[in-house]
Amino acid sequence: MRILLLCHSFNSLSQRLYSELAARGHQLSVEFDIADSVAEEAVALFRPELIVAPYLRRAIPASIWEQHCCLIVHPGIVGDRGPSALDWAIQEGEQAWGVTVLQATGELDGGPIWASENFPMRVARKSSLYRHEVTEAASCAVLRAVERFASGSFVPVPVDAADASARIRGCARPLLRQSDRAIDWQHDDSATILARLNAADGFPGVADRLFGEPCRLFDAWPEDRLRGGAPGEVIAWRETAILRATVDGALWIGHVRREEEANAAARADARSEANVRTFKLPATQVFATQLASIPEAPLAGETRYFAAVGRTWQDIRYEEAGSVGFLHFDFYNGAMSTRQCQRLLAAWQWAQQRPVSIIVLMGGRDFWSNGIHLHSIEAAESPADESWANINAIDDLAEAIIRNETQLTIAALQGNCGAGGCFLARAADLVWARTGVLLNPHYRNMGNLYGSEYWTYLLPARVGVEGAQAMMRNRLPMSPAVGLAAGLVDACLAGDLDAFRVDVARRAAELAAAPDLAARLQEKGAQRHADEALKPLASYRAAELAELQRNFYGFDPSYHVARYHFVHKTPASWTPRHLAIHRDLGWSLPQ
Ligand code: COA
């Protein structure tokens, strides 16, 4: 079928549906929801048989839904309506939630239902639930709805009838306002505050004040042992996070977005981030001056990489099972700043000294890595210098992984991986990906960034020169199955996160116990030496950095402009041509 994806932006759910539908042979094109007239034009050009809207922030115009079947993905259970579906579910502590695929009509979220899927809730951030449970459920429900549409015989169920037979039923709920999200530090306990911060994570955050300044709070971590101070007071800091006292303990806040005082009240209930000049940053970066008088609470000493006793803020964590070491790095949004790369390199070097024959790089639950930290770079005094420092720090890490000769190394992708993060993963000997993660192995969307992380060494060796050029040029998301077929990925494992971890641990243990392990390591060392003799790693790096020097310091500012729009979330004013194939000059409707 010819399917048009109409979406606010090509976010992770839109990307997942794109790759699932493409894998089933559908012809796809994407249009961003910029204005009614632009969407109408896209429909006229592409003449879709079906329109799927994975992520929209406004209603589809009647001129489109009256003529075409439009399937809307609503992140709520049957009967639920409104713009804050998942936010309410988390804040109200729902035990189960779901996704409903309904047809667009004049009534918002009130059209007949084509498919729905439920899931048990877990205590997690909205952005994490969205990237895991919601995305899985949406993918199942949309694929079922598309099959039903294709059959020509399915009659979608009016919402009232579906409501009556649903196991759990929702209702219409308004926008969750900042007044509903507000934290009362004098009375709310840690669990309540955590639920509020989780319900707002990603966007819009919880409006609050820190050191007397208005800001939005994100990225909360529970703390079981440290306490003290008056509720709401900042009592300690560690790396990127600050610790605030609550009435019954304390909570870590990892990220904040400063708000302009004048705009804070006016923006409290806005649904969009348009025209906001500030952006999300590590909390200790924003309040560096104020933290000078607050004690640091480091995880120190030899044991700092092992799981701390009780829950606390710990972004790098190591565990061992027999002769397999697992290095977890749970960096917010998968972004890796200069310091985070340096700290991970130190942890990597420490892990290499452990008595293990396999090291598994686990990344984080939601993201494995998205490469250099574009937000921290944007906030730097010299973004060009910080880009340079960050890329060198991530290159040092990639190099250390490539040069390891004492262990077999595995990148286990539990979460999505983008840009330099994909090539950092490829620096390991093996890349195992969870079914359902998304890979974006390309850089050019960031203002034609050339990229480094030794991709010119790592990628052609796996996918061939032409394959590498195509990946960089096409700039499309890739499922692990496609990555496996292309050679970028070595194994595509279980889709369920817990099952994936078990599978990774079992396979890694088998590799560690295999009689040919020593031979494999020897072979790996020999290959590396042969590669080095042919062309030293240093020349790959020098050539990549020469290109990046032009990106960062040259006369073409595209990278700086693209980064600015990325961190400020500037609404798109056109759909990139590689996604909107109906806007290709050469595109013509199949007869
Ligand atoms: N640095 C800083 N923040 C980053 C980031 C990076 N490299 N990559 C993603 N993020 C942040 C986004 O700003 C967003 O922040 P939010 O919590 O305020 O919404 C969040 O991570 C999720 O990103 P989003 O783009 O919504 O996720 P996605 O799953 O839809 O898309 C990518 C994933 C990888 C395609 C997209 O995030 C991307 O292009 N990232 C930039 C990659 C890059 O160019 N890195 C630099 C070169 S190595």
Image (cartoon, grey):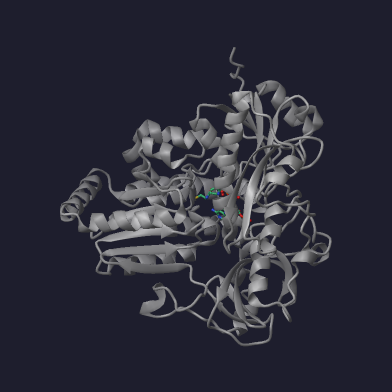
At x 67% / y 72%, what residue is drawn? 192
Tell me which corner region of the image, top left, top right, bottom left or bottom right, holds residue 190.
bottom right
Quarter in which the N terminus is drawn: top right
Q: What is the x, y in percent for residue 413?
A: 42, 52
At x 51% / y 75%, what residue is drawn? 311
Quarter in which the C terminus is drawn: top right
Q: What is the x, y in percent for residue 511?
A: 24, 54
Q: What is the x, y in percent for residue 67?
A: 76, 24
| Residue at far front of view | 165
- Left or right: residue 486 compared with residue 195: left
Tell me which corner region of the image, top left, top right, bottom left or bottom right, holds residue 582.
top right
For the question of whether residue 399 can be seen, the reply is no
Total numbered labels: 0
Q: What is the x, y in percent for residue 62?
A: 81, 31
At x 70% / y 32%, what residue is drawn? 70
At x 62% / y 20%, what residue is drawn? 585
